[in-house]
Image: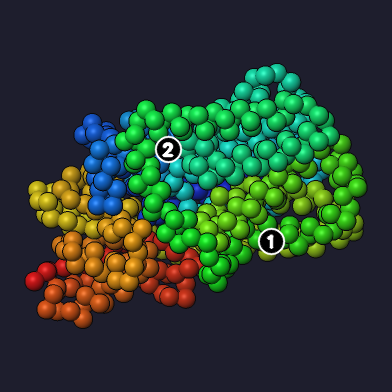
Amino acid sequence: MNFNARGPYFILGIVLLWRVSLLVFTAQPIPANDAFGYDGAVVHYLQTGHYFNPPLALVFPISGQQVFSMYPPGYQAVLLPWMETFGTSVISAMALHLVLFALAAWLTVVMVQKYFPSGGGYALAAWLLFGFTFGDRPEDLAYVFGLASLWLVLRQISNINKSGANAGGIVVLLLLTLYTSPIPGAYFFGVGFLASGMAWCRQRRAVLIIPFVVAAAAFVFITWLIAWKEPLWWAGFMESSRQQSVVTSGLHAPHLLDLMKLVRTVPVFLLALLMLPWIVARRRNLREFAGGNEAWFYLLAGIMVAGWGLLLADLTLLAANYVTYVLFTQVMLAAGLIALAPKIFPGREKRLRCVLVFCVVLVSVRAIGMTTWGAACAVKNSYWRTQETLHSELQPFTKTNTPVLVSSAYLYSAAEFKVGNAIDCGWYFDHAHWMNNAEMNALIRLKPAKLVVTQFDYYRSFAPLVEELRARPELVAVTVRDQAAVPTPDSIPPLRRVVQHISWAPVIVDLDWK
């Protein structure tokens, strides 16, 4: 490993040091609004012996009251022994995701260093790892499995390992990825299949394609078997599927804010798209581009095609937040552009590096905000001080069944305090029937006594609802207590989509229903 100041391993070390420091000293990145939805069943199992997630029960009665099956179980299978060892706190969950990030980042850098042309100077690509500022979902584990499968694909194309074990490893890792998080699983499957397919066109080795055929057939068979043998599990999964944006929104034109998210999250993919005509014009020089080893070039093409397929689907069919699923492969795409630059733009490589520096700055905006503004918030509203506030606010609800809406980041503490009826504030109404006033009607129907929500959740979702309730004093008396000692970017409209969710300070809303 090259740990010199210009090597990607050195940059990886800097990124990991930053992430560890951020967790230890500021308890960031703070879990976002889906985190406990995936972790809660394991937390509840370790506390009660029952594997379901009660805060989701209003919208997901199977996963919230019978058996948690709204998502494939790969992530929970890893989370369970982790929390058995390190506890069920939110810090424990955050530490697991830091470990998963470190593994995925290491796999990315290893592939670049081992299979991309030597002497490329790929440290600049490694700086893009600062773009990973959220980490609280099953995708973090799926990245590890997916990247490991691409590593084996590169080995297979490079003819380093001719044994069936390598092909078998690809099958196993693809299945693990798909049963951890289906959409990233499909993406990594696509990248590997495209890379192997292009290699097969030149090498005509069936072993390059067979693992993908076997993995696809096995995935279909196993899924069918589960649906047949365990209809309750399948019903729980379908219960969740009906809430997904592909069902609730359908095909639609990209929104302006979604396009902005695309630009600031995956600028290297946009840069590669701009460079594509020059690459295609010089396609006859493929072997020269590849530097004697075509495996990395095939991988690059697979990343480009599958990546843009996913990005377009995110903007028009799925959810814009899914653009983050290509972030690790964006690092490899940047490394590939650096390798290709001398062949495409001889004598002008520095211009490409300048553009990539701009890309690094663009994806690192939230990282900068977390390190500066987020640290300032942590001084005044630390994680530990917030735990004291949560205990004080939630203690009265430990012996009653009065509903309380709680943000995902605080539900770990609510479970620890044994709050009787804590409801995930993101799932108190059916998103599949998201019509006018759906949120307000659900609040009035539920009549929660209190909202205990993050700055992110309050200013993005609840502030307008609270103002509506204030205007109806005959219905409810509203008291808002914002605990933030330092103004947060979430409370400032122009900044809340640039730097968000960097403070542990809760917003407490007391509701006295008439």
Residue 248: % across, % down: 42, 59
**Which quadrant of the rendered structure holds the N terminus?**
top right
Q: What residue does disc 1 label?
A: 270
Residue 173 visible in rendering: no
- Residue occupying image coordinates x 75% and y 31%: 157
Query: Which residue is the extreme one toward the bottom?
Result: 471
69 horizontally vs 468: left or right: right
Q: Secondary structure at mark 2?
A: loop
Q: Residues within 10 Å of mark 2 (few under 14, many from 20)?
A: many
Q: Amino acid at mark 1?
A: Leu
**Which quadrant of the rendered structure holds the C terminus?**
bottom left
Q: What residue does disc 2 label?
A: 72
Q: Secondary structure at mark 1?
A: helix
* Front-lying residue, 457 or 383: 457
- Residue occupying image coordinates x 61% and y 58%: 312
Mark found first going from the N terminus, 2 or 1: 2
